[in-house]
Image (spheres, rainbow, N blue to C red):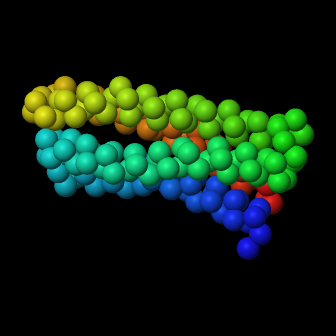
């Protein structure tokens, strides 16, 4: 396996884990949890899900720029010669990270606090804010993946 193939594979896997995880949570887990669980149990589930998933998101957050810069160097000899779509992808990555950090550092602690206090109504409000932010991040991630897929071979 070439250095480019290894770096590209790591880059794609990191994006797949992050965006695919959000898609699964939004489209599969959320509707199933609403159907199968009462509010308090659902909020407890989400605290546990976020705790586990965010470890993987942090791994992706680290791998994506490292592998992305590596790919830039190997394919385009640096930032200066990178095409516009690569610059757009980098900007969308920054948006995704900002949304993720907002959820991780502001919303998730509020959700944990509400669940620990058994303040279920407050927890539901916070969960609604998280859901909207994850939805926005999912859309940005899907746009980013679409841009990447439209450029086969990077």
Residue found at the far bottom of this picture: 1
Task: Tell me the quarter of the picture where residue 36 sits.
Answer: bottom left
Residue sitting nearer the eye, 35 or 6 = 6
Which residue is located at x 77 percent, y 69 percent?
2
* Relative height, residue 30 to residue 97 (above, below): below
Residue found at the far left of this picture: 118
Which residue is located at x 73 percent, y 45 percent?
69
* Relative height, residue 93 to residue 110 (above, below): below
Residue sitting nearer the eye, 120 or 91 = 91
Q: Quadrant of the N terminus?
A: bottom right
Q: Position of residue 46 (x, y in %)?
A: 27, 45
Residue sitting nearer the eye, 92 or 58 = 58
In screen coordinates, is 52 left or right of 63? Answer: left
Task: Tell me the quarter of the picture where residue 109 sits.
Answer: top left
Q: Number of labelled discs?
A: 0
In screen coordinates, is 55 left or right of 15? Answer: left
Q: Can residue 37 be seen in the rendering of this structure?
A: yes
In screen coordinates, is 4 left or right of 12? Answer: right
Q: Position of residue 24 (x, y in %)?
A: 42, 55
Which residue is located at x 64 percent, y 43 percent?
65
Q: Quadrant of the C terminus?
A: bottom right
Q: Position of residue 53 (x, y in %)?
A: 38, 50
Q: Position of residue 117 (x, y in %)?
A: 10, 30
Which residue is located at x 56 percent, y 54 percent?
14
Q: Can residue 128 be seen in the rendering of this structure?
A: no
């Amino acid at each position: 396996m070439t250095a480019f193939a290894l770096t590209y594979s790591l880059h794609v896997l990191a994006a797949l884990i992050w965006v695919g995880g959000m898609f699964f949570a939004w489209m599969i887990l959320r509707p199933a949890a609403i159907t199968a669980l009462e509010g308090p149990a659902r909020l407890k589930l989400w605290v546990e899900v976020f705790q586990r998933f965010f470890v993987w998101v942090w791994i992706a957050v680290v791998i994506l720029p490292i592998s992305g810069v590596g790919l830039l160097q190997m394919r385009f000899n640096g930032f200066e010669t990178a095409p516009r779509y690569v610059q757009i992808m980098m900007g969308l990555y920054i948006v995704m990270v900002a949304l993720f950090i907002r959820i991780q550092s502001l919303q998730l602690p509020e959700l944990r606090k509400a669940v620990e206090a058994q303040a279920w109504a407050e927890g539901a409000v916070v969960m609604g804010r998280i859901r909207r932010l994850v939805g926005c991040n999912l859309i940005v991630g899907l746009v980013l993946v679409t841009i990447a897929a439209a450029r086969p071979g990077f």
